[in-house]
Structure formats: C-alpha cells, structure tokens
C-alpha cells in the first residue's frame, strides 16, 4: 500500500466519521430540544417575534464566545509549554479538552434553543402574514352598509 492509498483511505474514513458525528449531533439537538420543552416546571414562553429571537440568539452567542475565549487562553497556555519542558503540557491539554467539552454543551443547547425559537417564530410569523387571497377576502368583507334611501318619499 502506497502512502497515497493510505491518505485516500484516511480521507474516506474521516468523511464517514464526520457524517456519523453530524447525524449524532442532529439527534442530540433534537433530544435536547425535547428536554427543554419538558424539563422545566413551566415550559419556556413562546417566541413571539424576531426581536425576541435575536435576543435568544445573542444570549447564546455570548456564552459560546466566552467558551471560545477560554479555549484560546488554554491554547496559549499549551503554546507556552513548547519552549519550557518543565511546564506541564498535560494540564494545559486537559484544560483544552474540558473547555472544548463545555463549549460543545453550550453549542448543542444553543442549537436546541434556536430550534425551539425557529418553531415558535414560524408560527408567530405565519399568523401575522396573510396570503393575497386571504387579504382580498378580508378587503371584500370590509364594506360599509349603505344608508337606506327613501325612494317612496320622492
């Protein structure tokens, strides 16, 4: 087996791994979405408009950005171990692993919350939007009653 064949095999294996992980993540997001709907004493309030949707997205983005910042700091610590053999790379690597796991949890929760937000927003915006036929019917139904005429009085 040549190195080219090995590289090709590795690429295919990694592609399969990525597909399998993607399916697992989609299933996990769906499960977390269901948990969010049922785990609380009272289910979360439905999202009524795009402003609320943005607020939810921004809140989760801020948490994820903090997680990425922590990973970046842990990575800088690991980088510092490269020049100093006495500095424990094991601890720095462990910190990166823990920070990435925490980020993964927050990303999955954020994705599940955004799925809930999407479902709610779809319903809210579909109620607000009317099809052209619905608008025509409503316009046609909105007419004023004519004043009665007294043709007999003339």
Image: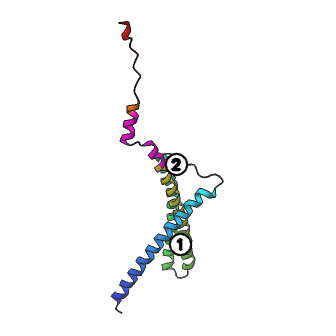
Q: Residue at x 42, y 77 (%)?
A: 16
Q: Residue at x 64, y 51 (%)?
A: 42
Quadrant assignment, res 8: bottom left
Image mark for residue 96? 1
Residue 138 in the image, given as x and y percentages of width and height: 40, 35
Of tags 1 and 2, the one toward the viewer is: 2
Question: Does 8 sit left or right of 70 as displayed?
Answer: left
Q: Is residue 94 above or below residue 2?
A: above
Q: Residue at x 40, y 83 (%)?
A: 10
Q: Is residue 132 above or below residue 142?
A: below
Is residue 127 one of those drawn in magenta?
yes
Is residue 1 one of those drawn in magenta?
no
Residue 135 in the image, given as x and y percentages of width and height: 38, 38
Q: Residue at x 51, y 78 (%)?
A: 81
Residue 115 in the image, given as x and y percentages of width and height: 50, 57
Total number of numbered discs in the rendering: 2
Residue 80: tell me if it is visible.
yes
Q: Nearer the viewer, residue 37 or 65?
A: 37
Quadrant assignment, res 150: top left
Question: Does 86 sit left or right of 128 as displayed?
Answer: right
Q: Residues within 10 Å of mark 2 (few under 14, many from 20)?
A: some
Q: Which residue is most to the right?
A: 41
Q: Which residue is most to the bottom?
A: 1
List the residue tagged with mark 2.
Answer: 47
Instruction: Give the extent of the magenta segment.
Output: 123-138
Q: Nearer the viewer, residue 112 or 27?
A: 27
Quadrant assignment, res 3: bottom left
Q: CA distance from mark 1 to mark 2?
A: 35 Å
């Amino acid at each position: 087996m040549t190195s080219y064949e090995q590289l090709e095999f590795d690429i295919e294996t990694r592609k399969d791994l990525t597909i399998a992980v993607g399916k697992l993540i989609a299933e996990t997001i769906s499960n977390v979405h269901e948990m969010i709907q049922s785990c609380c004493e009272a289910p979360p309030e439905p999202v009524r408009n795009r402003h609320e949707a943005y607020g939810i997205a921004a809140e989760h983005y801020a948490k994820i950005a903090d997680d990425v910042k922590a990973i970046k700091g842990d990575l800088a610590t690991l980088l510092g171990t490269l020049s100093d053999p006495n500095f424990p790379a094991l601890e720095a690597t462990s910190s990166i692993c823990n920070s990435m796991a925490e980020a993964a949890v927050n990303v999955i929760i954020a994705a599940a919350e955004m799925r809930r937000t999407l479902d709610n927003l779809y319903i809210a915006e579909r109620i607000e939007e009317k099809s052209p036929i619905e608008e025509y019917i409503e316009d046609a139904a909105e007419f004023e009653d004519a004043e009665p005429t007294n043709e007999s009085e003339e």
